[in-house]
Image (spheres, rainbow, N blue to C red):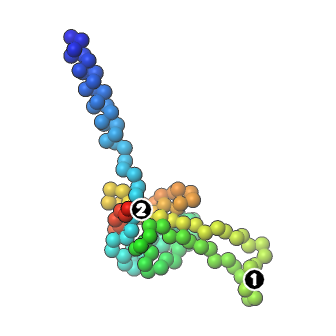
C-alpha cells in the first residue's frame, strides 16, 4: 500500500507543478511592425496618445520598423522671440515600446509600464 500511495503523491505533485507552469502567460517581447501602412500608423498614433493621456502623437512613416522603442519629445511653447514662455512646464521625453505576445501587438509606456493592446496591427518579435 505504501508503494502505491507514494507513487500517487509523486504523480499528483508532478501534475500540479506542470499545470501551474502551463497557465502562466508568455512574457511580452520586443517587436517590430510586419506590414506598415498609413492605417497602422494612425492606429499606433491614437494608441500612444491614449497611453500618454494626450491627443494622438504624430509618428514618422518608418516608426517601429528598425527599433522597438520610440522616444517622444515634447515641444516647448515659445514666444515670438523664440524664448521659452515663463511658467510653462519643461517635461522630459517619454518612450513607448512595441511588444508582442501570442501573435498580438501591444504598446507599453516605459515610464508608467502601462500596456495597451493594439488591434489591426501586425508585428513580429525581435531579438536584442
Left or right of residue 67: residue 82 = right
Of pointers 1 and 2, the one earlier in the residue sequence: 1
| Quadrant that contains the C terminus | bottom left
| Residue depicted at x 51% and y 57% | 114
Task: Identify the secondary structure beneath mark 2.
Answer: loop
Residue 100, image x and y in percent? 38, 60
Tell me if I can see residue 121 in this picture.
no
Going by the picture, which residue comes out furthest to the right? 86
Residue 18, image x and y in percent? 30, 36
| Residue depicted at x 71% and y 82% | 78
Residue, disc 1: 83
Left or right of residue 80: residue 45 = left
Going by the picture, which residue comes out furthest to the front? 128
| Residue depicted at x 21% and y 16% | 4
Relative to 21, residue 57 above or below: below
Judge by depth and name the residue closer to the eye, 16 or 115. 16
Residue, disc 2: 128
Amino acid at each position: 500500500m505504501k508503494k502505491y500511495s507514494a507513487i500517487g503523491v509523486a504523480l499528483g505533485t508532478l501534475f500540479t507543478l506542470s499545470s501551474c507552469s502551463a497557465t502562466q502567460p508568455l512574457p511580452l517581447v520586443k517587436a517590430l511592425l510586419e506590414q506598415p501602412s498609413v492605417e497602422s500608423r494612425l492606429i499606433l498614433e491614437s494608441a500612444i496618445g491614449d497611453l500618454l493621456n494626450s491627443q494622438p502623437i504624430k509618428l514618422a512613416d518608418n516608426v517601429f520598423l528598425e527599433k522597438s522603442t520610440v522616444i517622444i519629445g515634447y515641444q516647448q511653447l515659445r514666444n515670438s522671440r523664440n524664448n521659452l514662455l515663463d511658467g510653462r512646464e519643461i517635461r522630459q521625453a517619454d518612450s513607448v515600446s512595441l511588444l508582442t505576445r501570442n501573435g498580438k501587438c501591444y504598446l507599453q509606456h516605459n515610464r508608467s509600464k502601462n500596456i495597451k493592446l493594439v488591434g489591426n496591427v501586425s508585428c513580429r518579435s525581435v531579438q536584442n
